[in-house]
Image (cartoon, rainbow, N blue to C red):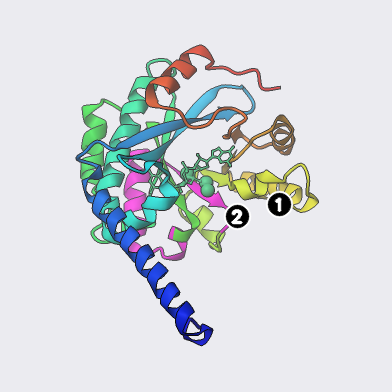
Amino acid sequence: AAKSMGGNRYHYFTQSMQEAVQQRMHMINDLHGALENNQFETVFQPIVDLKTGEICRAEALIRWHHPVHGVINPASFVPLAEDTGLIQAFGDWVFLEAARQAARCRKYIPGFQVSVNISPVQFKNGGINTDVWFAHLKSLELPPQAIVIEITEGLLLEIDESIADQLLALRDAGMEVALDDFGTGYSSLAYLKKLDIDYVKIDQMFVKNLTITEEDRVLCEAMTLMAHKLDIAVIAEGVETLAQLKMLSSFGCDCVQGYYISGPVGDQEFEELLQATHKMELY
Ligand code: C2E
Ligand code: MG
Ligand code: MG
Ligand code: MG
């Protein structure tokens, strides 16, 4: 296609492609040293129980503080980490950070949980080093019940015996499992039951126009009803307004997460938030 646009354009096209490739190579190069140079931070976003108003959970989200480019969001670098195999080490690091935060928060709220995003790639190429994860929990005297694993529908598409075994090992130890970005993929609904999923997280794309478009309202309500029929709790993501929160609550949605409550904050700020407003006035 580039050639048919003529010689000149072909030249510019290849040049910008070259730039893109070079930029990617620089990023990958920087990413290799990011962990040992302490450039990562884990931030935490509260998840609130709609029935009690309590902050019952937090989601751990990774940030990269690049010395030149500033804060880089996971959407930009997680795919690179996946392509280069670095995601295994990063994932182990985030897990430990999440576990540490869970241990700190459990001092105020005994049943508190922290959820961690796990890339499908972490389950491959030798898989998750579950022994290391369990050792972390032990050293923190933290029960596995304090951790929720967030997997995506993409993982269910590629699920094989090895992946199912790893998930089972985490589950058997007592960790809970949430299906992230629910409704955006093409996963078989049969897996919800088969894998004993504890939570579905309704993707923010459905919540965004929830109070504006009939279709999104119907979808959110239907997903909630279906999950509940299967004994699965529902967490809605990307809740930015009181109107969205109220509507989700009227469907029986269990928990909400989003800027209306709070964006992700640093670990200490989260602890302060928890101490100050553990129970929120939602309505
Ligand atoms: P996710 O797991 O679905 O996380 C929710 C994303 O929505 C987060 O973006 C969060 O900051 C953002 N968000 C929260 N509330 C609102 C809201 O009210 N409105 C809007 N518009 N957005 C909201 P973030 O932190 O940029 O993460 C993006 C994705 O990157 C995550 O989506 C997750 O799939 C991935 N990710 C983040 N941290 C990790 C990690 O440690 N490991 C792996 N493997 N993936 C991660
Ligand atoms: Mg998530
Ligand atoms: Mg999500
Ligand atoms: Mg998402």
Residue under label 2, please give it: 183
Along the line of sight, the residue nearer the viewer: 156 or 100:
100
Element under label 2? Answer: loop
Q: Residue at x 62, y 34 (%)?
A: 254
Residue 183 on the magenta segment? yes
Residue type, numbered disc 2 = Gly
Q: Earlier in the sequence, mark 2 or mark 1?
A: 2
Residue 80 on the magenta segment? no
Observer able to see residue 255: yes
Q: Position of residue 95 (x, y in %)?
A: 31, 39
Q: Do the residues under discs 2 and 1 have CB atoms within 8 angstroms?
A: yes
Element under label 1? Answer: helix
Q: In the current view of this chain or complex, which residue is farthest to the front?
A: 8
Density class for disc 1 (Cα within 10 Å; few <14, some 14-19, many ≥20) is some
Q: Position of residue 252 (x, y in %)?
A: 69, 36
Q: In the current view of this chain or complex, which residue is farthest to the bottom?
A: 4
Question: Residue 190 occupies which quadrant of the picture?
Answer: bottom right
Q: Which residues are magenta?
A: 155-184
Along the line of sight, the residue nearer the viewer: 124 or 206:
206
Q: Residue at x 70, y 33 (%)?
A: 249
Residue under label 1, please give it: 219
Along the line of sight, the residue nearer the viewer: 54 or 225:
54
